[in-house]
Image: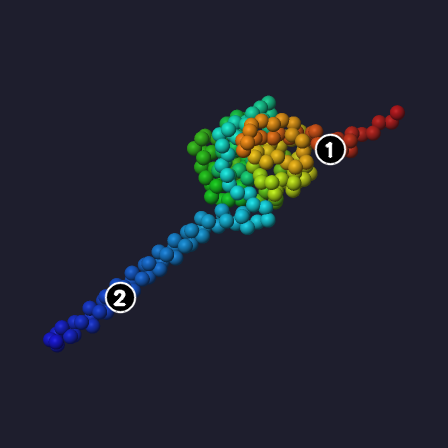
Amino acid sequence: MCPALAKEAPQEEGEGGSRRSGWGLLVTAGVGGTLVALYAVATPFVTPALRKVCLPFVPATATQIQNVLKMLENRSGSLVDIGSGDGRIVIAAAKKGFQAVGYELNPWLVWYSRYRAWRDGVHQNTKFYISDLWKVSFSHYRNVVVFGVPQMMPQLEKKLEEELECNARIIACRFPFPCWIPDHTTGEGIDTVWAYDLKHSRACETKSLEITPKTES
C-alpha cells in the first residue's frame, strides 16, 4: 500500500466513527423524547383506570345532550357537570344561559374544553377545573349532571345527598342512582336520562323538619 494512502485511512475511519456516534446520539435522543411524550399524553388517560372507581371518557351523544337540556327546562342557577370530558354538556348548558362548570380529572380534556368554549363564544359563562370529584364540594350548585358508572353511583348518591340543597336537581346519564326514585325520565337505551329533585328525598324532608321551629299550642 502506498504510504500516503496508509496515512489517510485511519483519519477516514475516525471521521466515519464520529458520524456514526452522532447519528446514534440523535436516534437515542429521538426515541427518548418520543417515550417521554407518549408517557405525558397517556398518563392522564391511564391514571383514572388505576383508581378504585374508574370513570372513563365516553363522549355524550347528540341525543343525550338534548335529553339533558330537556331536563333543564324551566331551571336556572348554577350547573355542574361531574366528569365533564370534552366539555360538550357544559358548553350546551352555557348556550342556554346557565353559569356552567365542569370538573374533569384529565388535564388534556380540560384544556380542550376551554378551547371549545372559547371557540363557541361561551368562555365567559363556563369554567373547567382539573380535579378529583371526590375532593370537591358541590354544595352551591342547583343543577348537577352526572355521567357515571355503576360502581360509583352508590357513593356519589350519598355524597350529593349530604352536600346539595333541597332545591337541587340531579340529572344522571346512562346509569341511574341505586336508591333514589327519579322524578322524570326521558330517552331510551344509552341515551336514557333520569332527573331527581332532591326535595323529594327523605334526607331533605328530615332537614326541613329540623329547620322548622316548633310552635306551642
**Residue drawn at the location 32% of the way across and 59% of the way down:** 26
Residue 76 image point, x, y percent: 59, 26
Residue 158 image point, x, y percent: 67, 40
Q: Secondary structure at mark 2?
A: helix
Q: Is residue 147 visible?
A: yes
**Which quadrant holds the N terminus?**
bottom left
Is 2 left, or right, of 180 in this rendering?
left
Residue contact between numbered discs 1 and 2, judged by CB atoms under 8 Å: no
The label on residue 157 is: none
Q: Secondary structure at mark 1?
A: helix
**Residue drawn at the location 27% of the way across and 64% of the way down:** 20
The extreme left residue here reads 2
Q: Is residue 78 visible?
A: no
| Model colouring | rainbow
The extreme front residue here reads 189
**Which quadrant holds the C terminus?**
top right
- Sort mark 1 into few (<14), some (14-19) or many (20+) by Cα contacts within 10 Å: few
The residue wearing badge 1 is: 202
The residue wearing badge 2 is: 18
Dot 2 amino acid type: Ser
Residue 128 image point, x, y percent: 52, 38
Dot 1 amino acid type: Arg
Query: Which dot, 1 or 2, sits closer to the camera?
Result: 1
Q: Above or below — where is 44 with respect to 215?
A: below
The extreme top residue here reads 74
- Sort mark 2 into few (<14), some (14-19) or many (20+) by Cα contacts within 10 Å: few
Residue 88 image point, x, y percent: 49, 33
**Residue drawn at the location 53% of the way across and 43% of the way down:** 56
Q: Could you tell which of marks 1 and 2 lies nearer the N-terminus?
A: 2
* C-alpha span from label 1 to label 2: 78 Å
**Residue drawn at the location 45% of the way across and 35% of the way down:** 116
Number of marks drawn: 2
